[in-house]
Amino acid sequence: MTQWLHWLAMHGTLRQLAKIGARQGDIQSRMMVDPAIRADPAPFYDELRELSATDGPLIRCRVGYLTVDHGLAQELLRSDDFRVIELDANLPGPLRWLEGRTRPQRFHPLRAPSLLAVEPPAHTRYRQAVSSAFTPRAVTVLRDGIRDTAEALLDDVERSGAGPAGAVDAMDRYCSQLPIAVISELLGVPDHQRGRLRELGESAALSLDLGLSWSQYRTVDRGLAAFDEWLTGHLAELRRNPGDDLLSRLIRAAGGGQVFTDDELRATAGLLLTAGFETTVNLLGNGVRLLLGNPHQLALLKDDPQMWPNAVEEILRLDSPAQLSVRLARRDVEIAGTHLRRDEMVAVYLGGANRDPAVFPDPHRFDVTRPNAGRHLTFSGGRHFCMGAGLARAEGEIGLRTFFDRFPHARASGTAQRRDTRVLRGWSTLPVRLGPDAGAELDGLIPRSDVRTRVPA
């Protein structure tokens, strides 16, 4: 009963209100319940852009505002007048009371003291403690290891019988495996536990969405409970047998009272372990999908491999692994000609801002030569800019280039499935035929609504 009451307070009531709001045309409600938007958000981006042209860059919704304007999104992400949102921040009073009394006491990526849910000075302290592992110099050191891991994973694909002429689910066998291997090495996770970490991370990804169904909620709740149990065991093992990994260093610092309380350590470790690979899994999968569907763009990269870093930026822009970020006004403030009251919410639609034609001409076109592709907002901005952005870019560049160098004749095969998430966007399955004898079954991989992203011959 407690579990059901928590779902009702956190998701169930909101889900029912969203269904009503969607029938009445509310933008936020439609985002929550319309599967067509999740399958292909590009037409929705354009619809919101048309609204912005008439109503201004801040679009009024039933609860708060939304924007797809690149300049305004950038301003909001950097502004000290706005803060990140906690999971229950905008619940009405009675629902917030009920949620607080039925809430499971465990890690959640959107609940303090997670980095995603706190502001300075706590945010500054946590970030400084872990940032050394993600500096440009640190990422440079990791590049050879990323390449070796990618090669070894592709060796396994060939040895398993998928071979040059066979078919493989690229998500299962490669795109999910590479980021998990990299973050596991960084955070002291033994090889034999990586499969379990992958399963737990997939549950954590869905926990970023609101308005979950009862079935989805139970899946997330079981996953977060299992992750919390696994994390407790992992940290305990590192306390007994510390290594040179980042978490061992944080444990030593916490034990000396230098940085973290135990709750802060758990929240930081949990976020690093989940956020450290979930978005990169999506980057790799989205990249494979886009390049298979745009062979002319892939040919450009084969002719000039120096373009791979820019190709990764274009993938991050066009098919953003993170679609949404939310901010609350710290105080009464005026922005874009609109007066916002304290605690009013603004949803920054990163995926839409990344296709703003005022910044990116012909924004729905996939173009690995796009000169300003790196202006995307996928990694957020300001003090909450993703610490792992450099590592994700390196994994995307090396992972995609290694895949297509090894399998230059790769083709789509069968039907791919999108993940059932809204905040994060990626593939759950991505069947690919690896050999030169494959048929170019592109329509089995790319929905017809996505054809706009192809480059004409």
Image: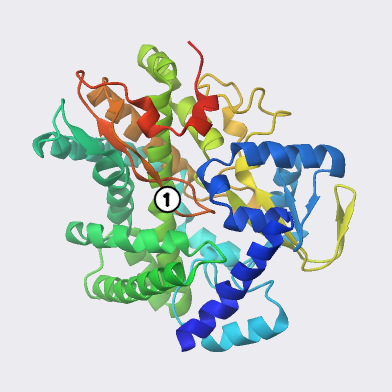
Give neighbour class at mark 1: few <14, some 14-19, many 20+ (Cα, 10 Å): some
Residue 67 placement (x, y as % from top left): 73, 47
Viewer can see residue 273: no
Front residue of 55 and 325: 55
> Which residue lies at the image location 65% right of the left edge and 82% below the top edge?
95
> Which residue lies at the image location 77% right of the left edge and 37% below the top edge?
50
Residue 361 placement (x, y as % from top left): 67, 23
Residue 251 placement (x, y as % from top left): 36, 71
> Which residue lies at the image location 37% right of the left edge and 76% below the top edge?
225
> Which residue lies at the image location 25% right of the left edge and 68% below the top edge?
242
Q: Is residue 194 left or right of residue 70?
A: left
Q: Eyeballing the image, is 181 above or below 150?
A: below
Q: Eyeballing the image, is 98 above or below 377?
A: below
Residue located beneath label 1 in the image = 419
* Residue 111 quadrant: bottom right
Q: How many marks?
A: 1
Dot 1: element: loop
Q: Amino acid at mark 1?
A: Arg
Front residue of 377 and 250: 377
Front residue of 249 and 440: 440
Q: Is residue 376 left or right of residue 199?
A: right
Q: Is residue 334 left or right of residue 5?
A: right
Q: Is residue 178 left or right of residue 253?
A: left
* Residue 435 quadrant: top left
Residue lying at the far front in this picture: please name it: 23
Residue 384 placement (x, y as % from top left): 60, 54
Q: Eyeballing the image, is 298 above or below 355?
A: above
